[in-house]
Image (cartoon, rainbow, N blue to C red):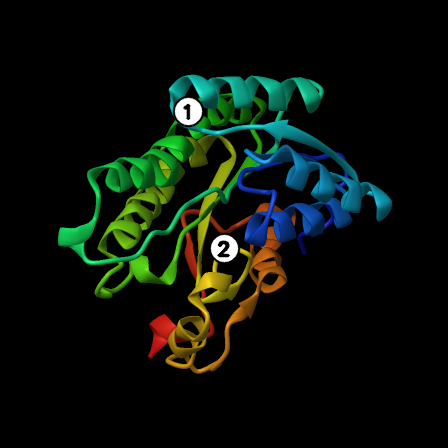
Amino acid sequence: MGSVDLTGRVALVTGATSGIGAATAVLLAERGAHVLVAGRDAVRGETVVAAIRTGGGKADFVAADQRDAESARQLAQQAADLGGGRVDILVNSAGIFPFGPTDQTPADDVDAVYDLNVKAPFHLVARLAPAMAERGRGAIVNVSTMVAEYGVAGMALYGSSKAALNLLTKAWTAEFGPRGVRVNAVEPGPTRTEGTAAMGENLDALAAQAPAGRPAAAREIAEAIAYLVSDAASFVQGAVVPVDGGRTAV
């Protein structure tokens, strides 16, 4: 029986200054990990770090915009330095999700979504997974979305970027799995976060389509991520796990 205890592990969580990323950072710290809180907003990042430390956990903030391969290289290097030379766990939670009609989507939005939702995880895994493989151990979780599984009007850009991330999850399993690196993904449904607050009643309407009938709390998504990075999930590889209240099951 695997353990969910993460004591001694170094975990890098991107997009960890708010929402699902912040909830994940807090939970992994509660489980004993040294969490590196990565994000663009230093004030929010330090707030998450302070909350973790107040609770008796270990955390550090790492500034990261993840705009390109060079910024991913810098983030990987800073994380390894803060982690005592290694990163054991990577959670790719940073992402943006502009919605709207395809013909009204600015070209800059297309580039921005793919830069952060697809290219940033790609570059970060390229930097961190080989070292995990050399050590024979590591866990990576990519945060996807339920709308990577089915078509929704207005969500073509966002959904397609996360569908690419789902395929990367499987390809990285084939590439790094034989050397001890487990790569999985979670597909959240509607979740109450700072980022989705602007959706208002639309969030509840979307959530009402699922058997659960309500939006998730960020902590509920974090629990699934924490399981996947732990030894309790030692035989789970290449899985894309719906955490959507049952929406994609019906």
Task: Find residue 14 and report its horizontal and vertical position in percent.
Answer: 54, 38
Q: Does any portion of residue 228 appear in the rendered image?
A: no
Residue identifier under label 2: 195
Q: Is residue 105 left or right of residue 179?
A: left
Residue at (59%, 36%) from the top-left corner? 41
The disc labelled 1 sits on which kind of residue? Answer: Ala
Q: Is residue 130 left or right of residue 114?
A: right
Q: Quadrant of the C terminus?
A: bottom left
Q: Quadrant of residue 150?
A: bottom left
The disc at residue 180 is none
Q: Quadrant of residue 118?
A: top left
Q: Give the spatial CA distance, label 2 vs label 1.
A: 28 Å
Instruction: Look at the picture and state if 148 lies above or below 248.
Output: above
For the residue pair 224 and 98, the one nearer the viewer reads as 98
Task: Find residue 125 and report its horizontal and vertical position in percent.
Answer: 44, 29
Task: Find residue 16 and report its horizontal and vertical position in percent.
Answer: 59, 42
How many numbered badges does the structure rendering display? 2
The disc labelled 2 sits on which kind of residue? Answer: Gly
Q: Quadrant of the N terminus?
A: bottom right
Residue at (63%, 28%) from the top-left corner? 62
Task: Find residue 215 and report its horizontal and vertical position in percent.
Answer: 50, 72
Foreground label between 2 and 1: 2
Residue at (54%, 23%) from the top-left corner? 75
Q: Is residue 172 left or right of residue 45?
A: left
- The secondary structure type at the circle numbered 1 is helix
Residue identifier under label 1: 126
Sequence-first tag of 2 and 1: 1
For the residue pair 46 and 140, the one nearer the viewer reads as 46
Instruction: Look at the picture and state if 65 lies above or below 147.
Output: above
- The secondary structure type at the circle numbered 2 is loop
Q: Residues within 10 Å of mark 2 (few under 14, many from 20)?
A: few
Residue extending furthest toward the left:
103
